[in-house]
Amino acid sequence: MLPKKHRLSKHAEVAKTTARGRSFFSQSFIIKSLAIPKSELAQFTVIVSTKAVKTAVARNRLKRVIRQAIHPHINQIKSGQYAIIIKRSAATITSKDLAVEVVEALKKSKLLKT
């Protein structure tokens, strides 16, 4: 689980990030990133719609997998606000593969400092 200071929880902030953020597309999800100059932290939210995954159990599992994949790298990610929007194809992937895909996507989008 992500620490509270690294969570993007306010509805207005999530809406601003998804509307104005730069997009990076992966096979299973979209990363929207918004650079905040005054911020020193990376804040995340994971969005899984009922259109993508029908059951609440499956939606929550995907959110947990994504958050667990981000957690070890949280201090190496550039500061800003990030929204990860899950696609339908993520429901068919195993948890390990999805976690690997998250880290690779962060590296390819140059959000993860290596």
Image: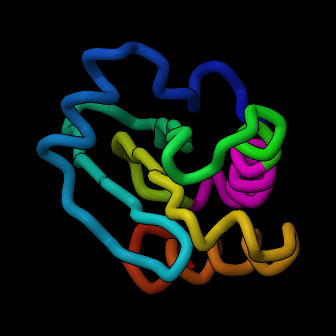
Q: Which quarter of the figure is the C terminus placed in?
A: bottom right
Along the line of sight, the residue nearer the viewer: 43 or 21: 21
Q: Is residue 74 magenta?
A: yes
Residue at the spot 40% in from the left edge and 36% down from the top edge: 40
Name the side, left or right, on which 85 lies relative to 103: left
Residue 63 place in picture, x, y as percent: 70, 44
State left or right for residue 40 relative to residue 32: right
Q: Could you tell whether 24 is left or right of 6 in the image? A: left
- Front residue (pair 90, 44): 90
- Residue at the far left in the pictured view: 20
> Relative to 90, is 68 above or below?
above
At horizontal 85% and vertical 74% (from top left) the residue drawn is 94
Judging from the image, the colouring scheme is rainbow
Residue positioned 79% across, 45% down in the render:
58
- Residue 74 on image: x %, y %: 64, 51
Front residue of 99 and 80: 99
At 45% across and 52% down in the image, what residue appears? Answer: 85
User: What span is in magenta?
Assistant: 62-76
Main SS of residues in magenta: helix
| Residue 6 placement: quadrant | top right
Q: Position of residue 42 (x, y in %)?
A: 47, 42
Quarter of the image for residue 89 reads bottom right
52 lies above or below 99:
above
Left-right relation of 14 to 20: right
Q: Position of residue 54 (x, y in %)?
A: 66, 43
Q: Is residue 93 magenta?
A: no
